[in-house]
Image (spheres, helix red, strand yellow):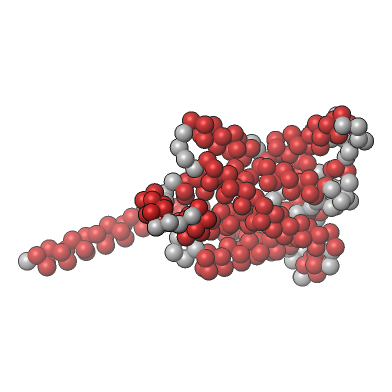
Amino acid sequence: MAGHAAVVKRAGAARGDLLAAAVLLPPALLLFTVFVALPIGQGAWYSLFNWDGYATPTNFVGLKNYVRLLADGVFAHALANNGLIIVVSLLVQLPLALGVALLLARRGTSTTGFRTIFFLPYMLADIAAGLIWRLVYDGDYGLLSTLVRALGGPAIYPLADRNFAFPAVLAVIVWKYFGFHMMLYVAGLQQIDKHLYEAAGIDGANAWQRFLHITLPGLAPMVRLSVFFSVVGSLQFFDMVAALTGGGPLNATHTMVSYLYFFGMTRMRVGFGSAVGVVLFAVCVSFASGYRRLFMRRD
């Protein structure tokens, strides 16, 4: 009798699940199709045409947009810039965020205040942050140049110098985003059982050993998530470049997305811009799927 009741209960639960799927799945599929699948398909289709965005594309060029893209030195430089953002994010921004998180992990009024201060840049819109730092870097009346002149040096124009423009952008990226990763690490540190540290201290483990064998393993899920966000965000980086440099000087600070915008959309080369978008989409999806499969299977 009890077995029959359990079977009936399971059948009822299964019918409930099917009903919920029948009600909730079609709207989700419709939204995904309209706002994700169709635009991706349209972009791939438009990339096969020499099209200015008006009327129906008719000048079919096949893969010529991709050939032109891969032969363009500016795009290669933009791709290298994206790679440099990833390297700086992984080797400078994330270790800095972890170091500050370790200092501010304990609960308290002072640590809460410092967390807020470090997190505030992330709350700024990228465009606003870019415009603020454009004023800071301005060689005529910016803060940086004013300080250099006060010390007896000449006015400096970092955003106008091809050799210094992108390092200046990288400095802003670290300033803008490390607070976000810091908060991820702070949240992860607060989830680690404090008794582990007490037991390690009793066993004679020093600070480095506690960090290596307790803190890092406990933070592993957050570190993997932070790396994922950092790389995907670096590949999609655009707003701050548009506000700070517009890709200049001499196309030295373009990323893949700013290249798409300035060399595709603003020049009414929608077909070519769509090809850039397809390449960017392929890179992002390849990384996201591969990274999740290799490193985030158990998260």
| Residue 81 occupies quadrant | bottom right
> Quadrant where the C terminus lies?
bottom left
Residue 298 vs residue 270, the one in the foreground: 298
- The structure residue drawn at horizontal position 64% and vertical position 37%, both measured from the top left corner, is 121
Going by the picture, which residue comes out furthest to the left?
1
| Residue 8 occupies quadrant | bottom left
Q: 46 above or below 156?
A: below
Residue 32 on image: x %, y %:
52, 56
- The structure residue drawn at horizontal position 72% and vertical position 43%, both measured from the top left corner, is 172
Residue 157 on image: x %, y %:
88, 40
Residue 145 on image: x %, y %:
85, 34
- The structure residue drawn at horizontal position 52% and vertical position 65%, both measured from the top left corner, is 295
Residue 278 vs residue 283, the one in the foreground: 283
- The structure residue drawn at horizontal position 87% and vertical position 32%, both measured from the top left corner, is 151
The number of discs equals 0
> Quadrant where the N terminus lies?
bottom left
Going by the picture, which residue comes out furthest to the front?
204
Residue 206 vs residue 255, the one in the foreground: 206
Residue 144 vs residue 131, the one in the foreground: 144
127 with respect to 195 (left or right): right
Residue 219 seen in this snapshot: no
Q: 165 above or below 299?
A: above
Residue 47 on image: x %, y %:
73, 63
Residue 238 seen in this snapshot: yes
103 with respect to 19 (left or right): right
Q: 17 above or below 108?
A: below
